[in-house]
Image (cartoon, rainbow, N blue to C red):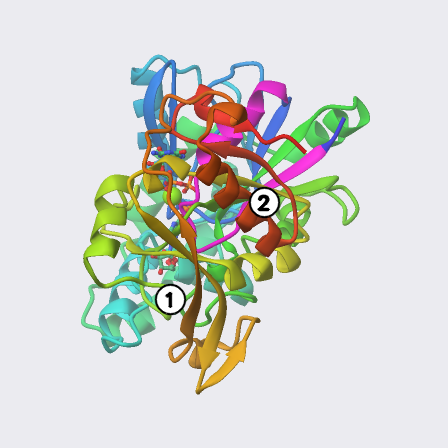
Amino acid sequence: MPVLAVVGAQWGDEGKGRVVDWLARRADVVVRFQGGDNAGHTVVNEHGLFKLHMVPSGIFRPEVSCIIGAGCVVHPQALLGELAELQAQGIDTGNLWIDERAHLVMPWHLLLDGIEESGRSARDQIGTTRRGIGPCYTDKAARRGIRAGDLLRPELLRARVTAAARWHDIMLRHFGQPEIDVEAVLARCAAEAEALGGRIVDTTLRLEQAQDGGATILLEGQLGVMRDLEWGIYPFVTSSSPTAAYAPAGSGLGAGAVDEAIGVVKAYSTSVGGGPFPTELLDATGERLRSIGGEFGATTGRPRRCGWLDAVALRYAVRRNGLSSLVLTKLDVLDDFAEIAVAEAYSLDGARIDRVPTTDDQWRAEPVYEWLPGWQAPTKAVRTWDALPAAAQAYVRAVEAMAGVPISHVSVGPERDAILEVPR
Ligand code: GDP
Ligand code: IMO
Ligand code: MG
């Protein structure tokens, strides 16, 4: 029946992976539509605990086709490592496909990501994952990228790798790096083609067949709107578009294909990397959120910056994505707090604003908080909405009112059964 886009409604790490793993029980196809192995999507299920980077979170169900869409960038070695890990944990990865149009993260992209990041001043640091994402998308836009399908055409690959190496050598030489060894790169590509070749296909046929057959298709986003290339805190953003509007583009579906865009939002805020973050708490409360919530990056292990929920950013996420509902995760992390704040507006140079301002102004935006009573009772074992403490229910309803769209589910733990339906 439907095509659902599942996207991050904050700065990433909202719990998209676990929501997709859970929704996949009713899906036929899951497509990752953008980003690369900068993602860290944690899934906890009966098979164990997994940190997925490139593989769609539907992989735990062998009947679900998993597609790495054309909008993604793929580091073949990293993907092979991830597949090997999954297989070692008993997961059948036979149903993973890579669109031939997806771009490849090449060795020079990783080098350039590091070089560029090291050259930025403390305030300008994006804090990238150093996975080569920005330089790879740069090459895609500059039309000198190498695509997954090129791996299957040795002559074309040789020409494109040679041309790309020639170009990048100019910059790498400037930074004192050795010349790219084209033959070594091609040898590595040959091994990658051997290992991944059978999975590299034109995925549009499969998707069309799925659509025509009335299949349920999930489009899995990476990161969140606040780090979207267009709509995020530019330049502290990733180099692709994690918003739901891009989901059909990166997957190969048409503009009207998405029936519903579901936003995943944490019960508080976190951000990894640089840039403004108005509700950031640099005090003991922030530290408490980090330690209770286990807020350390799934990809880089970096401590995540933590703060109260930002309803200004959440409303922005609802509009920029066209969200029709939200899944609110990590409610249990707030169990011990006597009072919980939500930023319902900002104060900017003394004036109250209730919209997300430009990045430059966000540095000076001060949160205007509404304080809500905590519940100070454990919720981790709760399995129905009715069994949640009244103050926890009230918190969810308050967030829903501020967001302007229904919260369909809340989660109180990372496991599949810790997702509770919120009554209408
Ligand atoms: P993603 O990148 O959006 O998929 O999110 P991450 O996996 O990077 O970060 C979410 C983290 O929160 C993971 O460690 C999840 O296991 C964990 N998590 C997700 N939902 C819940 C929840 O409801 N409660 C708790 N305590 N942890 C959760
Ligand atoms: P998931 O999918 C949180 C951040 C980086 C950096 C900026 C750009 O797990 O939510 P990049 O490597 O993409 O060039 O870095 O984006 N970032 C993430 N933050 N979760 C992620 O993925 C992220 N992927 C990138 O910290 O600030
Ligand atoms: Mg993550």
Distance of label 2 from label 1 (alpha carbons): 31 Å
Q: Is residue 27 visible?
A: yes
Determine whether, in the image, residue 217 is placed left or right of residue 66: right
Which residue corresponds to mark 1? Answer: 277
Residue 157: % across, % down: 47, 47
Residue 26: image quadrant is top right
Identify which residue is drawn at 46% across, 29% down: 388
Q: Residues within 10 Å of mark 1 (few under 14, many from 20)?
A: many
Q: Nearer the viewer, residue 398 or 195?
A: 398
> In front here: 224 or 400?
400
Which element type, helix, strand or loop, lies under badge 2?
A: loop
Identified by mark 1, the residue type is Phe
Point out which mark residue 70 bears: 2
Ligand 2 quadrant assignment? bottom left
Query: Can you tell me whether the CB of the residue at mark 2 lies under 8 Å from the nearest atom of ligand 2?
Result: no
| Quarter that holds the N terminus | top right
Residue segment shown in magenta: 3-26
> Residue 203, image x and y in percent?
64, 33
